[in-house]
Amino acid sequence: MSEQPLLNVSDDSLGKVEIAPEVIEVITGLAASEIDGLYAMRGNFASGVAERFGKKAHSKGVKVELTENGIVIDLYVILQFGVSIPHVAQLLQTNIRQTLKNMTALEIDEINVHVVGIQMDSPEEATEKTNS
């Protein structure tokens, strides 16, 4: 496992609950995929290779950083052409914040949305063009 510290969620008489940053990445990726207008998340080379072999990378395009001020999440997304970028970014931030609050009870300091691309064709149009 990685050397990143675990997040202490509770420490009471029953025991201790800790959450690994990788869990926050996966929850963030799943919450982001629920938003209309999101085409894909940008991953790195390793996650792309893993997806080619059938392994789903739910944390692709998500970076979680633990700072002195709190938890900072950076989200790297590709949006569909024609959507309102500020509207979709706000929906992403709201859904991720609510999902993480409900599942982990953690307060997130920042959710930064980085739009790294726009998908011009819909998936149906792309397959029609390759088939003709």
Image: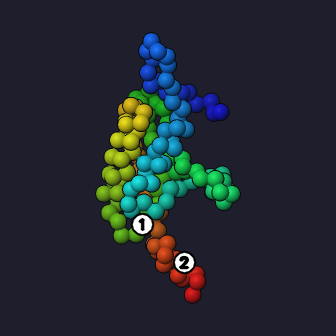
Foreground pick, 99 / 22: 99
Cα distance between the residues tagged 2 and 1: 16 Å
Quarter of the figure with residue 12: top left
Q: Position of residue 103 (x, y in %)?
A: 41, 36
Residue at horizontal 39 percent and vertical 42 percent from the top: 99
Which residue type carries mark 1? Gln
Quarter of the figure with residue 88: bottom left
Left or right of 36 in this view: 51: right
Left or right of 14 in this view: 86: left
The quadrant in which the N terminus is found is top right
The correct choice, above or below, for 25 with respect to 115 in the image is above
- Residue 8: numbered disc: none
Quarter of the figure with residue 107: top left
Under tag 2, what secondary structure?
helix
Q: Position of residue 48 (x, y in %)?
A: 63, 57
Q: Is residue 104 visible?
A: yes
Left or right of 50 in this view: 130: left
Q: Position of residue 2 (x, y in %)?
A: 63, 33
Under tag 1, what secondary structure?
strand
- Give the total number of marks visible in the rendering: 2
Q: Which residue is mark 1?
A: 80
Q: Residue furthest front?
A: 14
Which residue type carries mark 2? Thr
